Image (tube, helix red, strand yellow):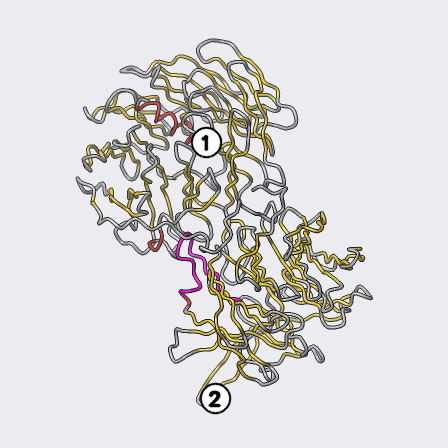
Amino acid sequence: MGRGSAVLVAVSFLVASSIQAEAASLSKTPTAFSDDGRILLIQTDELVVWDLETKALVAKIPGLHCHQIALLKQEGWVLCVEHSVTIYDWKNRAAVGTIPAESREPYRLLAYSNENDRMVLRHGDGAVSVWQVGKKLTPLKHLALDQKKDISSVAASPDAKLLAIAQGHTIHLHDLGGATIRDVVIEGGKPRDLLFAPDSSRLAVGVGNTIVLIDPVEASISMRTRVTSSEGAQGPLTPEAFSRDGHRLVAANGDWSYALFKTETGELVSLTELTSTVQGRGMPSPTRLRAVDISADAEYLVGQPEQPYTLQIWDLSTGTIQPDLCGQDCRNMGPRVSLLKWSPTGSKILVGMQGGLNPEVDGKISLWDVASRAPELVLDPSQPQAKVLAKRPTPPTPLLTAPSAPTVAPAFVHAQALRAMASSPSENLIVTSGDEGLLKIWDPGKGKLLRQLALSDPVSALAFSADGMILAAGTHKGEVRLWETQTWQEFPPYAGWHGHINALQFLPGNRFLVVATELPKVSVVDLVTQSAVRELVHTSSSRVCDTKGCVTTRVAQGEVVQALSLLDGSPYLMTMSRTGRVVWDVTTWRVVEKPAGLPEAWSGLGWKQPFVWTTTRSSDPKVLTLAVWDTKRNAVVASLDTFTKRDTEIDRGPPVSLGTSMAVDPSHRWAATRVGEHVSVWDLGTQMKRKTFHVKTPSHLHWTSDGKHLVVATLDRKILVWSAETMEPAHYLRDPSVTR
């Protein structure tokens, strides 16, 4: 493949993205590679040309400030598209030809073909023109666009022979070498985005939640494909990039995921979900990309998520996240990224950013090696040679599962994000909810899906009553649904709020339910009278000290409560916000500053548990210990895992702090602790560790009511069931209908 063909891939991708929203756009800094990756053209303060093989700055082109750039068929020629269009010969330092500005709107390059040395330009919203490139720019065709009609997208084929215009429900295909116009009518929706394959053999069209593939020669629809709800549909499908050979298509699936399709069959190869985990929140949340680029083979995507801020790589063929590109250089710094671009071979990524911990690349354009995840060259146009940076060792392949973890095919419990999970205190049941709106009831010991309930709104919080007879589910829209768990007959729902429900907690006796929402108050609901009998305002406290002593005061403004915790057998309910915890005496509904028998910071272990878990400090202020606390004795029952803050973080991938958690089985024989991605099972009688195993991105721990199985929920929609009898993993829970 020649230099122009590679440029066509880059140019077609750049043009398609410019028509779409800017939220996840290609690099803001115009760039172009030669097909072998040797010559690099970058528009910064100046338009400059680098030879990456010799690491030399070979040309600076004055006076050009381009919105789009391309390397042309003729050696040394570059194309600069702005309000005017200029062809410049950087070897001879002379302009070859110019198309003057026509309006306030800049030109837009739709395609350039080195095969016939032609380019297709869009003149704002007014027209499209075709030009023969050479020592003299020759206009070949001029097509006026009717601005009064509903034109949603315009695209030219990479060979510069066809122009596609989406207008209403119709796509008009213009023969740019003649006068023929053929129409393709799209039933079921209006086409929004058009993208030609690099070989011009296919035209991808985004129509709502469907991708339509058109044969532009026959002017016929060859295939329709989509992502189903069970596969993880999230919103409109927007074609983003074809692979170089045209056999695969990457499409944005809403704002938070990318789908990879086979273009011959329409088969969904994989779905790459973009999620992040906020410290202390447990379950992942969708995240958008601030900048993104897709490799020419459509195998990988590099982007900067809104949260976390590092530069991340995803394998589009499997949907899996890869080790950070930027790693410690970007960790928690939130760099401003102006440039992300794969080299044609896929082995390098061009990065322009400000911020981060590496002063070598801060505020500069650098070339990063994908294998070692390290910057190799700094391209400073004020210097004649690129700066070569010291090599880093290639990072080891991350450990994804423990040696003793079951090696099975991917086992997912939901088609979309696993949002909440609860275990019954009376029967060996767990209930899970997903963003697709399904509530699923499982027997974890047997690994069976017993029942599923389809709801009109996804569930964000779950809670069982003390006897396990009632299940409460709080939805995204502020409704509480209730079921009797023997027959799964539903009680009348309660809807007293508008907005997302964060947490639920039954009080003893099953009549009262505590509900935390997105509003800065917590409601205590009487389920018999279907009314809120009390509202709690969670406020943070501040400590003011002077020479006479210290006084703790509370601010007047309420805060949103994220979690609830009840100490079984006591009158104490804890409400937790982002800034702190408040303990309430449920007999008086007054705030208790320091409950008798409890440590300063604690978390309940659930129904039938006279204990709480807490953290204690050792002589080393950086080292903490997970401990079980006996509230009757006001003392530690067992000191278990010791850890530092660093132990709670993931060493690979984005900078996520998973924190710690603990669960004690109902017979009080076993305790499970989690520090980051390591789960340990302890014998409480001897305080000895029986087993430690590794689980990728675990979140919550639950014991079954018979104490025979530990259930570990993970952030990637998997649930591992661990046998206390064998001290080995038993199985993953699996819904056969969910394959991805």
Residue range highlighted in magenta: 646-661
The correct choice, above or below, for 647 with respect to 26 in the image is below
Residue identifier under label 1: 241
Q: Position of residue 14 (x, y in %)?
A: 41, 31
Q: Nearer the viewer, residue 265 or 97?
A: 265
Whether residue 7 is situated above or below residue 408 in the rendered picture:
above
- Amino acid, disc 2: Gly
**Residue lying furthest front in this view?**
726
**Three-letter code, disc 1:** Ala
Of helix, strand and loop, which one carries label 2? strand
x then y, percent, for residue 350: 32, 40
Cα–Cα gap, marks 1 and 2 = 66 Å
Left or right of residue 404: residue 77: left
Residue 191: which quarter of the image? top right
What residue sits right under mark 2 in the picture?
549
Q: Earlier in the sequence, mark 1 or mark 2?
A: 1
Q: Position of residue 457 (x, y in %)?
A: 69, 49
